[in-house]
Image: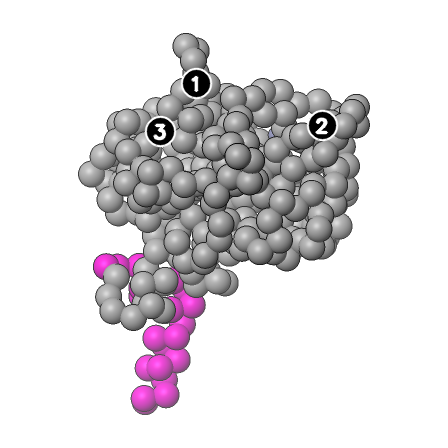
């Protein structure tokens, strides 16, 4: 009987059910108590990779047991789960391929919540969200950069700028992606972010230069992690048999480790430098 109930409890833990309540004593308990809200609402272009992204983040949460996830997939859920008061239910927010001007019930409260110590994580078109019409939008200021444009999908070699950060320590010196839609970023200042992945040449015409792909930064007491990778399903998903796969499974495995490391870092679960390398 004792053995059975232990098994039952373990099952609940694996499902991420038991420790989603208030944190209690002990580091392990606190870790499992981190709650993350995954936002996939779009008001502009809608990526077909969104269901894949939702699935993968859920799997990473369950497998790592580092955090539990809740989702905001439409305006109704955003209105309910993202009020100034409801934001207190979460330790971090993931904007996975969001686009456009999102109907946040209280945008200022949201940005202040991150500034106050929560984690903010965004993938790919998370930077194609809330564009400023008059100067830089506070959201882009928080993120540290903003989508400008992209050209045809290409293969790139992303140069690792921090070989010890949890989001990049598994890459070695570079991360080669066989095919992806690579963003060009504007309103970006390397003196305000800690760079994680960059290109040393233009993704398409290959002219030498400095093109940010992924970075992290402190925002008040909060932590921000961004990666512009995440357009294609086969970047997110490790299923070897998925339809239309071009990127090798190893690329998606490395991508998942990249975002899991970034999420853990943004939640304060793993240490990592956030000091800008450019003075
Ligand atoms: Zn895209």
Residues drawn in magenta: 1-22
Q: Is residue 45 left or right of residue 241?
A: left
Q: Which residue is mark 2?
A: 209
Q: Mark 1 sits on what residue?
A: 136
Front-lying residue, 143 or 22: 143
* Left or right of 219 on screen, residue 166: right
State which mark lies toward you, 2 or 3: 2
Question: Which residue is situated farthest in the front direction here?
Answer: 279
Name the quarter where the N terminus is drawn: bottom left
Task: Residue at 39%, 75% (x, y): give it.
Answer: 10
Task: Name the main secondary structure of what is drawn in magenta.
Answer: helix
**Which marked residue is nearer to the observer: mark 2 or mark 1?**
2
Q: Residue at x 76, y 28 (%)?
A: 208
Q: If you read the primary sequence from the N terminus, does the residue marked by circle 2 or circle 1 appear first?
A: 1
| Residue 58, visible in the rendered structure | no
Q: Is mark 3 within 8 Å of ligand 1?
A: no
Q: For this rendering, which residue is in front, 276 or 160?
A: 276
Mark 1 secondary-structure assignment:
loop
Residue 146: x %, y % from top left: 52, 25
| Residue 191, percent from left and from top | 51, 32
| Residue annotated with mark 3 | 75
């Amino acid at each position: 009987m004792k053995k059975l109930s232990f098994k039952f409890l373990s099952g609940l833990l694996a499902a991420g059910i038991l420790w989603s309540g208030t944190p209690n004593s002990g580091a392990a308990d606190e870790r499992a108590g981190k709650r993350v809200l995954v936002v996939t609402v779009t008001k502009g272009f809608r990526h077909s990779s969104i269901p894949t992204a939702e699935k993968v983040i859920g799997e990473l949460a369950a497998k790592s047991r580092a955090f539990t996830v809740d989702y905001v997939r439409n305006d109704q859920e955003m209105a309910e789960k993202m009020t100034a008061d409801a934001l207190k239910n979460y330790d971090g927010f993931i904007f996975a391929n969001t686009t456009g001007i999102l109907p946040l019930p209280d945008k200022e409260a949201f940005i202040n919540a991150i500034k106050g110590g929560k984690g903010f994580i965004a993938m790919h078109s998370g930077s194609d969200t809330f564009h400023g019409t008059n100067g830089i939008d506070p959201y882009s200021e928080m993120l540290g950069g903003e989508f400008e444009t992209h050209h045809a999908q290409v293969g790139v070699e992303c140069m690792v700028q921090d070989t010890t950060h949890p989001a990049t320590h598994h890459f070695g010196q570079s991360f080669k992606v066989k095919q992806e839609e690579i963003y060009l970023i504007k309103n970006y200042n390397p003196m305000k972010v800690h760079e994680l992945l960059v290109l040393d040449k233009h993704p398409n015409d290959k002219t030498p230069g400095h093109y940010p792909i992924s970075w992290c930064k402190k925002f008040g007491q909060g932590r921000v992690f961004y990666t512009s990778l995440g357009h294609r399903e086969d970047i997110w998903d490790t299923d070897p048999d998925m339809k239309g796969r071009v990127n090798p499974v190893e690329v998606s495995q490395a991508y998942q480790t990249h975002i899991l490391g970034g999420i853990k870092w943004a939640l304060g679960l793993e240490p990592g430098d956030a000091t800008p390398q450019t003075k």
